[in-house]
């Protein structure tokens, strides 16, 4: 009898209504803070976050992955999903991301992207332009600055922006990463000698990050509440503190 | 047009890894099969580790160990002048760890199943351990030898997690077939992904079929059928 009770309890746990968020890797730094603030108002809510490249998350959602909210690093992916009839309302831009050039060794970056041509720089990390919006923006910035042909052979590709950040902190000379990463406490150990410089905003399209609500309020009330919360002044303040601009 | 570079890279990686591992694993497997040292279980456990460890564990340690600011990465770079992060050489080193048990274990099993008297006869005839290994032991474990070589090769072709973590996805350098397919799925180029995946499936099957067919024939011949 007792075993049956425990089993029922376990099954109940399994099916308890969580909010499952599929979040682009760049949100890995700010999202915990946002969830913390959300939980103050919704103490009973339980939120699971899957962090990954936007492209991968989009493919998973398109193939039926059980997420409630998709926080992409671009607008193209949530829009494509919505076109296919996935999601309950049109996607909304919740943040604008920016790129920074980062050197763990404290190289002089005052001249911006053009330092990458220098002989001293052997390896440059960017996110994979095919799968990561921050990588696409980085490639665009290099192309618009006329540097792509000169640096293409030096580039290593991170699977997502978070892997690119790891490469940048540990293994390469310079990386082009999300500005939001700079505000993560996890990077503090690497910041001592580091230098960084925003990438000229004229060289790439603003990284407009869209989100898509995947279930109705009836199906998952907490998901809708979080979706709404992300558009409040309180959440936007947190996003700004992590280096995002607000739409 | 299909870009076959990722396949070429995968096979080059697997080929090199197989050759290098054979040179390392042959003496190791021979020693393990002959020794009565107390150290044997320890070495056997160490060798078998890559079978149980998730590739992410291996990838993580390699990432830490091979970074240019780590002492190991530094040491290797100054001593051999080769960079291991984000290079093909790095993948070869990673694969040698990753595939080690697949070379050692079949060889060791083969050696252990050899008739003791045959080995002793070789020693009585005045042959050195080296001669015994090369001229007596090795020719008599052909099925194990072929299994070790082919499975090591195939397992390395199938490598994915480690490469994804320490490779950097560089076309023509570290973008092997398994990673290329992963990327195609991510960007939903299913058409291309199907072609690549089918090539991989076909090749892997042919390789395995070849091994099992060969072993089947050799065993039958040994039994005199």
Image (cartoon, rainbow, N blue to C red):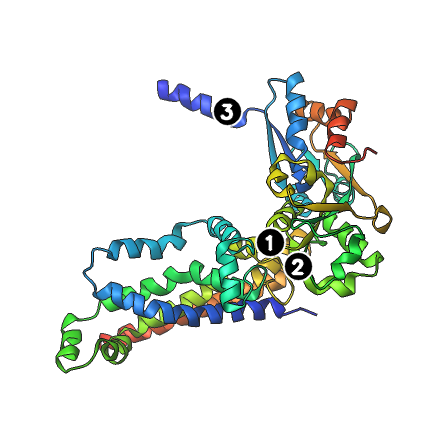
The quadrant of the image that shows the C terminus of chain B is: bottom left
Secondary structure found at label 1: loop
Query: Tag 2, which chain?
Result: A
> Counting residues from the N terminus, which is met first, the one under dot 1 or under dot 3?
3
Which mark, by number, is residue A215? none
> Which residue is pictured at 84% across the width and 51% down the height?
A203
Q: Is residue B84 above or below residue B132?
A: above
Label 3 sits on residue: A13
Along the viewing direction, whichever of A99 and A79 lies nearer the viewer: A99
**Badges 3 and 2: C-beta atoms under 8 Å apart?**
no
x and y percent of residue B92 in the render?
50, 65
> Counting residues from the N terminus, which is met first, the one under dot 1 or under dot 2?
2
Query: Tag 3, which chain?
Result: A
Locate residue A95 relative to residue A49 in the image: left or right.
right
Q: Is residue A217 visible?
A: no
Label 1 sits on residue: A171
Cα separation, mark 3 vs mark 2, equals: 47 Å
Query: Tag 1, which chain?
Result: A
x and y percent of residue B219 in the render?
28, 72
Query: Are marks 1 and 2 in one subunit?
Result: yes
Along the viewing direction, whichever of A128 and B185 lies nearer the viewer: A128
x and y percent of residue A134 in the render?
73, 47
Along the viewing direction, whichever of A179 and A67 lies nearer the viewer: A179
Query: Are marks 1 and 3 in one subunit?
Result: yes
Q: Is residue B104 above or below residue A31?
A: below
Label 2 sits on residue: A123
**For mark 3, does the 10 Å Cα neighbourhood hold few (<14), some (14 to 19), or many (20 or more) residues?**
few
Secondary structure found at label 3: helix
Q: Is residue A42 above or below residue A215?
A: above
x and y percent of residue B50 in the render?
40, 54
Cα separation, mark 1 vs mark 2, equals: 8 Å
Locate residue B91 relative to residue A178 in the image: left or right.
left
């Amino acid at each position: 009898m007792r075993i049956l009770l425990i089993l029922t309890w376990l099954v109940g746990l399994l099916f308890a209504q969580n909010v499952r968020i599929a979040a682009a890797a760049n949100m890995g730094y700010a999202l915990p803070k946002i969830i913390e603030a959300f939980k103050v108002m919704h103490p009973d809510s339980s939120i699971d976050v899957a962090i990954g490249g936007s492209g991968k998350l989009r493919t998973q959602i398109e193939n039926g992955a059980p997420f409630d909210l998709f926080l992409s690093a671009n607008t193209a992916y949530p829009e494509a999903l919505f076109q296919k009839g996935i999601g309950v309302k049109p996607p909304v831009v919740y943040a604008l991301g920016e790129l920074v050039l980062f050197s763990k060794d404290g190289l002089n970056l005052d001249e911006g992207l053009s330092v990458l041509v220098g002989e001293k720089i052997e390896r440059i990390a960017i996110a994979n332009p095919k799968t990561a919006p921050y990588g696409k923006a980085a490639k665009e910035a290099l192309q618009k600055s006329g540097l792509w042909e000169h640096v293409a052979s030096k580039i290593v590709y991170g699977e997502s922006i978070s892997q690119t950040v790891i490469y940048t902190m540990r293994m390469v000379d310079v990386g082009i990463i999300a500005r939001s990463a700079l505000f993560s406490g996890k990077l503090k150990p690497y910041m001592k000698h580091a230098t960084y410089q925003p990438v000229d905003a004229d060289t790439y399209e603003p990284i407009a990050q869209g989100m898509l609500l995947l279930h109705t309020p009836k199906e998952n009330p907490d998901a809708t509440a979080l979706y709404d919360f992300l558009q409040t002044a309180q959440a936007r303040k947190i996003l700004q503190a992590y280096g995002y601009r607000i739409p | 047009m299909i870009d076959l570079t990722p396949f070429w890279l995968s096979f080059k990686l697997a080929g090199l890894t197989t050759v290098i591992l054979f040179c390392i694993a042959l003496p190791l497997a021979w020693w393990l099969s002959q020794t009565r040292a107390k150290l044997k279980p320890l070495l056997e456990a160490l060798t078998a580790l890559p079978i149980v460890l998730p590739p992410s564990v291996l990838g993580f340690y390699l990432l830490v160990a091979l970074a240019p600011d780590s002492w190991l990465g530094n040491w290797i770079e100054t001593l051999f002048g080769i960079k291991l992060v984000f290079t093909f050489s790095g993948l070869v080193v990673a694969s040698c760890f990753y595939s080690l048990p697949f070379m050692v274990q079949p060889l060791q099993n083969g050696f252990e199943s050899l008739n003791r008297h045959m080995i002793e006869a070789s020693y009585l005839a005045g042959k050195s351990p080296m001669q015994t290994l090369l001229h007596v032991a090795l020719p008599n474990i052909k099925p194990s030898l072929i299994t070790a070589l082919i499975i090591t090769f195939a397992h390395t072709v199938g490598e994915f997690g480690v490469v994804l973590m320490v490779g950097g996805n560089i076309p023509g350098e570290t973008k092997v077939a398994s990673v290329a397919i992963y990327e195609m799925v991510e960007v939903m180029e299913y058409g291309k992904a199907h072609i690549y995946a089918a090539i991989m499936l076909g090749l892997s099957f042919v390789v395995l079929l070849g091994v099992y067919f060969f072993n089947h024939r050799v065993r039958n011949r040994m039994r005199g059928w």
